[in-house]
Amino acid sequence: MTEAQVQAEIYDPLLDQEKAVGEQKHPVVNPHKKKASWLRTILWMLSMVLLVNVIMAVIAYILHCYRII
């Protein structure tokens, strides 16, 4: 038997798996990512400021009720 025939008879599952992974196509990804508009960015920033203010108000109310401050 030639060396090529011996290698063809030897089954290597890891090699097959590597070949299968290498042949897979990546899922279709949108190449043009939508840029966030300035309005959207500003609205997001304002919503985060309001969220922090609400959290601070709740903390201040709890501390005031328990006379810690």
Image (cartoon, grey):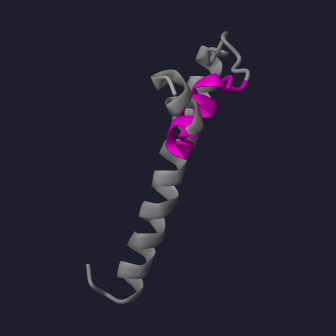
Q: Residue at x 67, y 27 (%)?
A: 24
- For this orientation, the residue located farthest to the front is 1
Q: Residue at x 68, y 22 (%)?
A: 25
- For this orientation, the residue located farthest to the left is 69
Residue 55: x %, y % from top left: 47, 62
Residue 39: x %, y % from top left: 64, 19
Residue 53: x %, y % from top left: 47, 54
Residue 38: which quarter of the image?
Answer: top right
Q: Look at the magenta stretch and give its main secondary structure.
A: helix
Q: Residue at x 51, y 22 (%)?
A: 4
Towards the viewer: 26 or 67: 26
**In the image, is residue 14 part of the stretch drawn in magenta?**
yes
- For this orientation, the residue located farthest to the top is 32
Q: Which residues lie in the magenta part?
A: 10-27
In this picture, residue 63 sits left or right of residue 53? left
Quadrant location of the C terminus? bottom left
Q: Residue at x 62, y 19 (%)?
A: 36
Q: In the rendered view, would you say 68 is above or below 58?
A: below
Towards the viewer: 68 or 31: 31
**In the image, is residue 47 part of the stretch drawn in magenta?**
no
Q: How many marks?
A: 0
